[in-house]
Image (cartoon, rainbow, N blue to C red):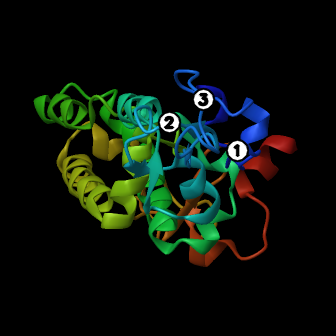
C-alpha cells in the first residue's frame, strides 16, 4: 500500500483478479456477490473486506487537490489512519505546480519559509522561550526542516485553515522573541544594496530576500535585476 501512496489507481477489471477478493481471496462478482472497488488501490473486494468506509486519498489531494472522502477497503482505511500524521508527501517532488494553483498551499509554503529562517535564530538561543517554541513545534519539526514535506493531515488542515493558524501563532511568538532578545536581534543584516543602518531579517519575507549563495539579506525593493553585491565582492 505504501508503494502506491502518490499514485492514482485505476480499475483493471475483475478478470485481473480472477474474480477473487483482493483481501481474503473469496470469489466475487457474477453469481458470487457484489465486488466493491477500493478508491485507493483500484482493487476489488468482497462485502466483508470492503464495508463502504471512506477516507481522503493522498494521491488525489496531491494531483487534483481533491480532499473529499472516497470509499476504501477496510485494510486501506486502517493503513491511511496509521500514516495520516506521517510526513510522507513531498509536494515539490510530486506536483510543484500545486503551489501556484492552490492559494492556501502557497500561503503555507511562505509561512514555513519564515519558520525555517526563524529556526536559525532559535536553535542558537539559550533563552527559555526558545525552548518553549521548540516544544510547540514538536513532533512536527519537519515543518521547519523541509518546507515541502507534508503529512496527509497537514494537507487536510491546510484546506481548513488550521495549519495556517497554527503556524502564524508560532511565527508571531518567534518574531517577537527575536526582536526583543539581546542575542537574537544581533543576528540581523544590513541591506547589501542601500546599506541602510536599520537591521533587517530573512524571516521578513514580504520585504526582504536572502541570496541563496552567500545568504546575505537585502530589501526586495532595492534588488531589481542587479547581482548580489556580496557575491560580486567575493568573485573579485
Using the numbered discs, state the Cα–Cα distance from disc 1 to disc 2 in whole angstroms.
Answer: 36 Å
Marks 3,2: beta carbons within 8 A: no
- Residue 127 is situated, as x and y percent measured from the top left of the image, at 16, 30
Q: Residue at x 57, y 37 (%)?
A: 32
Earlier in the chain: of badge 1 and badge 2, it is: 2
Q: Residue at x 66, y 52 (%)?
A: 211
Earlier in the chain: of badge 3 and badge 2, it is: 3
Earlier in the chain: of badge 3 and badge 1, it is: 3
Residue 161 placement: quadrant: bottom left
Relative to 41, residue 179 above or below: below
Which of 55/230 is in front?
55
Question: Which SS class for mark 1?
Answer: helix
- Residue 210 is situated, as x and y percent measured from the top left of the image, at 59, 54
Q: Residue at x 51, y 45 (%)?
A: 147
Q: In the rendered image, which residue does mark 1 sit on?
A: 93
- Residue 220 is situated, as x and y percent measured from the top left of the image, at 58, 72
Residue 45 placement: quadrant: top right
Numbered badge on residue 19: none
Q: How dense is the environment of label 3, judged by Cα within 10 Å: few (below 14), some, or many (20 and up)?
A: some
Q: Quadrant of the N terminus?
A: top right
Question: Which SS class for mark 2?
Answer: loop
Q: How many marks?
A: 3
Q: Is residue 71 left or right of residue 93?
A: left
Numbered badge on residue 46: 2
Question: Which SS class for mark 3?
Answer: loop
Using the numbered discs, state the Cα–Cα distance from disc 3 to disc 2 in whole angstroms.
Answer: 8 Å
Q: In the rendered image, which residue does mark 3 sit on?
A: 27
Q: Residue at x 62, y 75 (%)?
A: 222
Q: Furthest-left residue in view?
A: 128
Foreground disc of the pair 1, 2: 2
Say if residue 155 shows up in the picture: yes
Amino acid at each position: 500500500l505504501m508503494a502506491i501512496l502518490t499514485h492514482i489507481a485505476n480499475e483493471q477489471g475483475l478478470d485481473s483478479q480472477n474474480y477473487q477478493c483482493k483481501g481474503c481471496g473469496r470469489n466475487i462478482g457474477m453469481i458470487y456477490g457484489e465486488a466493491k472497488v477500493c478508491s485507493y488501490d483500484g482493487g476489488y473486494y468482497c462485502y466483508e473486506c470492503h464495508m463502504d468506509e471512506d477516507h481522503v486519498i493522498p494521491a488525489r489531494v496531491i494531483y487534483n487537490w481533491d480532499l473529499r472522502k472516497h470509499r476504501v477497503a477496510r485494510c486501506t482505511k486502517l493503513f491511511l489512519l496509521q500514516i495520516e500524521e506521517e510526513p510522507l508527501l513531498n509536494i515539490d517532488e510530486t506536483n510543484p505546480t500545486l503551489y501556484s494553483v492552490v492559494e492556501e498551499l502557497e500561503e503555507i509554503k511562505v509561512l514555513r519559509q519564515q519558520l525555517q529562517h526563524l529556526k536559525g535564530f532559535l536553535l542558537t538561543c539559550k533563552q527559555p522561550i526558545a525552548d518553549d517554541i521548540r516544544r510547540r513545534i514538536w513532533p512536527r519539526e519537519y515543518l521547519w526542516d523541509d518546507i515541502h514535506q507534508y503529512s496527509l493531515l497537514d494537507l487536510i488542515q491546510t484546506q481548513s485553515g488550521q495549519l495556517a493558524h497554527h503556524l502564524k501563532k508560532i511565527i508571531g511568538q518567534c518574531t517577537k522573541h527575536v526582536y526583543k532578545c539581546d542575542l537574537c536581534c544581533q543576528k540581523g543584516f544590513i541591506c547589501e544594496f542601500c546599506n541602510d543602518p536599520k537591521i533587517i531579517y530573512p524571516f521578513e519575507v514580504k520585504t526582504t530576500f536572502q541570496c541563496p549563495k552567500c545568504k546575505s539579506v537585502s530589501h526586495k525593493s532595492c534588488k531589481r535585476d542587479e547581482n548580489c553585491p556580496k557575491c560580486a565582492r567575493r568573485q573579485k
